[in-house]
Amino acid sequence: MSSYDYDLFVIGGGSGGVRGARVAASLGKKVAIAEEYRYGGTCVIRGCVPKKLFVYASQFHEHFEDAAGFGWAVGESSFDWKKLVAAKDVEIARLEGLYKKGLAGANAEILETRAELVDAHTVRLLKTGQTVTAKTIVIATGGRPNPHAALPGHELCISSNEAFHLEELPKSILIAGGGYIAVEFANIFHGLGVETTLIYRGAEILSRFDEDLRRGLHEAMAAKGIRILCHDTLQKVSKGEDGLILETLNNGTLQAGVVMLALGRDPNTEGLGLEAAGVAVDERGAVIVDEYSRTNVENIYALGDVTNRVQLTPVAIHEAMCFIETEYKNNPTRPDYELIPTAVFSQPEIGTVGLSEEEAGKRFPELEVYRAQFRPLKATLSGRAERMIMKLIVDAASRKVVGAHILGHDAGEMAQLLGVTLKAGCTKDDFDRTMALHPTAAEELVTMYAPSYRIRDGKRI
């Protein structure tokens, strides 16, 4: 009989923690999981899911406009922010209930309290002060928005967390940052009728994405009326008579009703008791793990954003399943981070998998790049000037497709399926042999027969 209270104790009720706890419990292990806020974590409660619901809401004004080109007469429309927030809250509560139901159904013990490590096998439950012991511990506490505390007036700003709960929709907003969170919220607020400015220190939004898609999205956003200020940063935020006054490095003084900081996320490890347990962290506070998600303390693992590896929900879930294989099925399994499909739910949308042209140029001596830019069929009657971009990056020696990138409607859906294709190691010849499905935008992926240009030793030829 075990000398511990639990076989497994999980700290953090997000996607990775819940999956690990639920599956371990279903294998007959005695499991407890503790969450101090709400079950579901960043993704369900204050991330992917509510964000996507807001994305849908923000698209309707364009749908109404497009309808006229197809013969529809749409009457006067109006938008109710509070109604959207209330509907979103109902759905999030439903999903949180499903997470708890799954845990309960597997006989995992659900604890609604903050939990902190006392030592390598002991956890303190702050709500009651009780301490419990576990043979194995998993840290899955996720991350939180960086508050950018060095910015004077940062306390007057919001993060993506608060953006989901604003009591009123502002007339204007300035969003600091150029990553996918900043870009997505810029499109959301603009789509809901808010005067929107994006300020970013870099030369172009969405670093690490393919350059063509970055430029294409920037142009599309600017054409819609989103103001994008690159090569610039916020220097100070202060209260004015009518909103907030913003001092910038290169664009003088600006005003906005709300300022949102989307300047990265930090691992959620502060005050967790890691030092007492002997768990090592890096300079950013992220838990250091090996290739099997094990910390330097043999019986303690860490999953998801708290490790600052790849900050995506499906990755945390995948890491949890690898942990189960390693710890409970005698099958040591390393998470596979190659060819992760990624989407930016901007307007237009980005879907991508594999290497960008720039990254591939550093890895392969010669590339073939297939690129198509076109006006989608729907835009011919709607009158929109938006264009789609599709790119395939091909290693010339092996003919293997090493990158696929799409800018346009439903790009994320296409990227998911392209993820299977690239994971299978398909070549450009496989794409060429595949019959096109007409009329679709995706048919361009299998009808680009001649390379648009080649890259040799990192240079276009």
Image (cartoon, grey):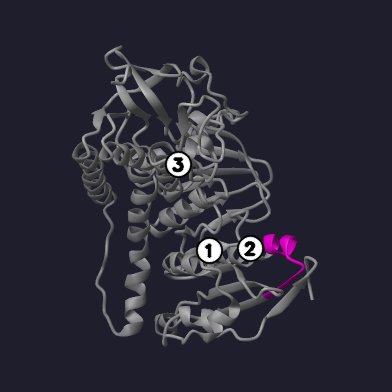
Image: magenta residue range: 358-368
The quarter holding residue 362 reads bottom right
Q: Residues within 10 Å of mark 1 (few under 14, many from 20)?
A: many
The quarter holding residue 137 reads top left
Give the residue at mark 2: 356
Residue plotted at (72% across, 61% down): 363
* Residue 242 relative to residue 41: left or right: right
Residue plotted at (51% across, 33% down): 294
Give the residue at mark 3: 258
- Verify CB contact (< 8 Å) between mark 2 and mark 3: no
Amino acid type assigned to the residue bearing label 3 in the image? Val
Picture coordinates of residue 454, whole percent (x, y): 73, 76
Point out the tag, 2 or 3, that comes first from the N-terminus. 3
Amino acid type assigned to the residue bearing label 2 in the image? Ser
Give the residue at mark 1: 352
Q: Residues within 10 Å of mark 3 (few under 14, many from 20)?
A: many
